[in-house]
Amino acid sequence: MVSQQVQGLLTPKRSLLKNHTNFKGSQMPFNLNSSVTTPPIDYAVLENKFAELIRLQDLDAKIDDNPAWKESFEDILEAAFVEAFDSEEGEPESMLFLQRTLYRINRMKFFWYDDLDNYNNENSRFLFEVQSRIESAWQEWEADHVYTGPVSAQEVTARLQEKVAEDLDPDPSERDLYFRNETSKTGYRHLLAIASIDGLVEASQMSRVLGGVSNEIHARLTKIFLEEYGNGNLSRKHSSFFKSMLEELDMKTRPEAYFELAPWQVLANINHSFFLCEQKRNFLQYIGALLFFEVSVPASFKNYQLAGERLGLSPEAVDYWRLHIKEDERHGRWMLDDVALPLVDFYPSAAWEIVRGYDQQRFISARAGQAVFESVRQAERG
Ligand SMILES: [Fe+2]
Ligand SMILES: [Fe+2]
């Protein structure tokens, strides 16, 4: 449902709607008409139109020729912000629209061996603006959930050691126990479907922070990256293990095949990684987030491995989990001792940003985990 505030925002757009009729027969491939913009906003229609637009030849030139469309899209974004960020939990429909829109822009940072037209607008001014607007509104909202402010370098070291010790061996949560003891084959397949969106391009964000000057910290990060990429051996690449799991269960292995199933919280998790790795000013936060991932994976993946084994699946259908339980135990140690702690000495006054990155990732991952759990339960209920 659209809140009253949103309705207020939409009202002035009625004048813009008249302009949209001018697009009929113009170069723009679609019109925004009242069925899209009259409350409640039809996010599904908007999303499909945005997916078309992003592949246009010379998008910026076409936008320049139709400034009213840009204004109208910006109005819709503002309306979606009001709706999405009005509450602490986020409103699901508008949040899904914003996170999918952001994801469609972010995915162009990777190469997918797909149609080259998918990259036509990689450097579009319009898309850059859309991305910046969504990221700044969303990140401002995220910042209200986790507050980690400046602390001394000494305190950073103590906190990181304490948090890592906690996350290496946490008490199992309700959802951990559910996966371990109760989830069905349907639930397990649903879990893989959602996880595949990131799992099939796993660790790709890391490639975005590795270019640049070398030192011991950089060398260690490179070593972790190489292991994630199977040292150049495709069959050893971590995402290949994910693909094998999908094949064993006769599931689709095309990247993004299950995009539609991803709850907004999962896309927010992926978009947050892009936000951290694409802006070098966020490097310390990125390191904190990566430290959390590597440290927390063995404990959480253990539940999925046990689920697969309990369901009688083949070793290949659980190998991805097993591999991570083994390798990430080492990656977590390297990330703490050889990357995060040396960075505290390197940037003593900004080192608290590593803790912030860690805390925020812990929160965003837990939120995504809960959403996946709920989605799995729903799939199991049929
Ligand atoms: Fe991995
Ligand atoms: Fe790893």
Image (cartoon, rainbow, N blue to C red):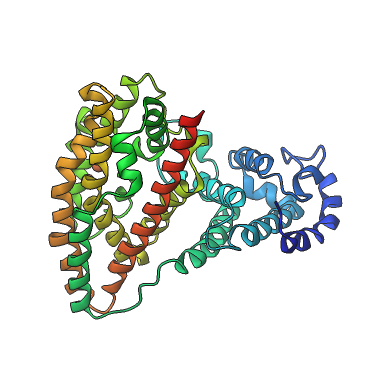
Q: Residue at x 41, y 42 (%)?
A: 373
Q: Residue 45's spot in the image, x, y percent?
A: 68, 40
33 and 55: which one is in front? 33
Asked whether residue 337 appears in the rendered view, the answer is: yes
Q: Residue 361's spot in the image, x, y percent?
A: 35, 58
Q: Residue at x 72, y 57 (%)?
A: 71
Q: Residue at x 35, y 76 (%)?
A: 149
295 vs 150: above or below: above
300 vs 305: above or below: below
136 and 372: which one is in front? 372
243 and 185: which one is in front? 185
Q: Residue 260's spot in the image, x, y percent?
A: 52, 35
Hey, which quadrant is residue 338 in on the image?
bottom left
Q: How many marks?
A: 0
43 and 108: which one is in front? 43
276 vs 372: above or below: below
Asked whether residue 202 appears in the rendered view, the answer is: no
Left or right placement of residue 371 versus residue 216 in this view = right
Hey, which quadrant is residue 237 in on the image?
top left
Taking the image as four quarters, which one is ligand 1 found in? top left
Left or right placement of residue 367 versus residue 60 in this view = left
Q: Residue at x 46, y 47 (%)?
A: 267
